[in-house]
Structures are given as C-alpha cells and as structure tokens.
Image (spheres, rainbow, N blue to C red):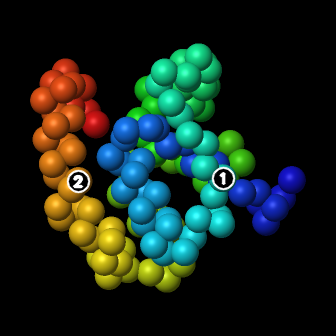
Amino acid sequence: MSTNEFKARAYVKHGCPFSFKFLVFMSEAGLLDRIEIIRMKPDDPSYDAQKQKLDKQLGKPATFPVVEVEPGQYQTDSDRLIERYAAEGGLTPDSLPVLSFYKQTIFPQLIELYQIKHPKTAKSA
C-alpha cells in the first residue's frame, strides 16, 4: 500500500480531554475524512491488548491520542498532532472558534480534575 492510499488511524481514548481536543480540531478544520477513528474504551476487554500494541509501536507507554500518521509511524501529543494537521491543511488552530473555546474554558477545568483524580500520572500527561 502506498502512502497515497494510507489513511491515518487515530486512537482516541474515551473520557480523554486530549483526545477530545484533537477530535474537535479535526472536525472543525474539516479534516475528519483524513483519519480513521479507533475508539479506545478502558472498560472494553480488548483495551489492554490494544494499548500494549501501541506501547510497543511507540517504544514507551502510550498517551492519547495516538495517530499512526504514516504506515508504521506513530505520533502522540494532541498539540503536536494539531500542529501537524494544521500545517498540512494550511490552517491556524487559534483561528478556529470551537477549538479556542474548548482550550480556553473547558479544557483547563478537565486538566484540573484529571490532576486531582490521578496525582501520580498527572505530571506526565
């Protein structure tokens, strides 16, 4: 399969504010057709096996979202992924009103709650 035929796979975790930020951007930017969305549900029996595969591909514990941007090439970090797709689409993420609203209002509250709920892992998220 050539990279022209390849469709990126976005692994997004249920309840993850970073995954949601990435999906908000992709949707508002009109780029959802560039990715196949794979929903990772922690309570799904296949979650641990899928996450282990992502860990192996990344060479470190996976954080979400994870996108297979090219065959065998994986990238994490919602901000870096947004930058990547914004550059490919000639877009400025800060000019997108829904993404800006989310980042300025809801996202900080979700991060604060995450830090309270997961104090040991919050520093690395």
Q: Classify mark 1: residues with Cα within 10 Å, few (<14), some (14-19) or many (20+).
A: some
Q: Which mark is residue 107?
A: 2
Image-quadrant location for residue 4: bottom right
Q: Identify the residue under disc 1.
A: 36
Question: In the rendering, at what x and y percent does residue 53 appear?
Answer: 61, 25
Question: In the rendering, at what x and y percent does residue 18 appear?
Answer: 35, 48
| Residue type at the position of mark 1 | Glu
Question: In the rendering, at what x and y percent does residue 87 appear?
Answer: 48, 75
Q: Give the vertical position of 53 relative to 27 (above or below).
A: above
Q: CA–CA distance between discs 1 and 2?
A: 24 Å
Q: Look at 47% across and 25% down and name the residue there.
A: 42
Image-quadrant location for residue 116: top left
- Is 12 or 89 nearer to us in this picture? 12
Query: Can the viewer see residue 110 in this picture?
Result: yes
Q: Give the vertical position of 92 relative to 65 (above or below).
A: below
Determine whether, in the image, residue 99 is placed left or right of residue 34. left
Q: Look at 13% across and 41% down and name the residue there.
A: 112
User: Secondary structure under badge 1?
Assistant: strand
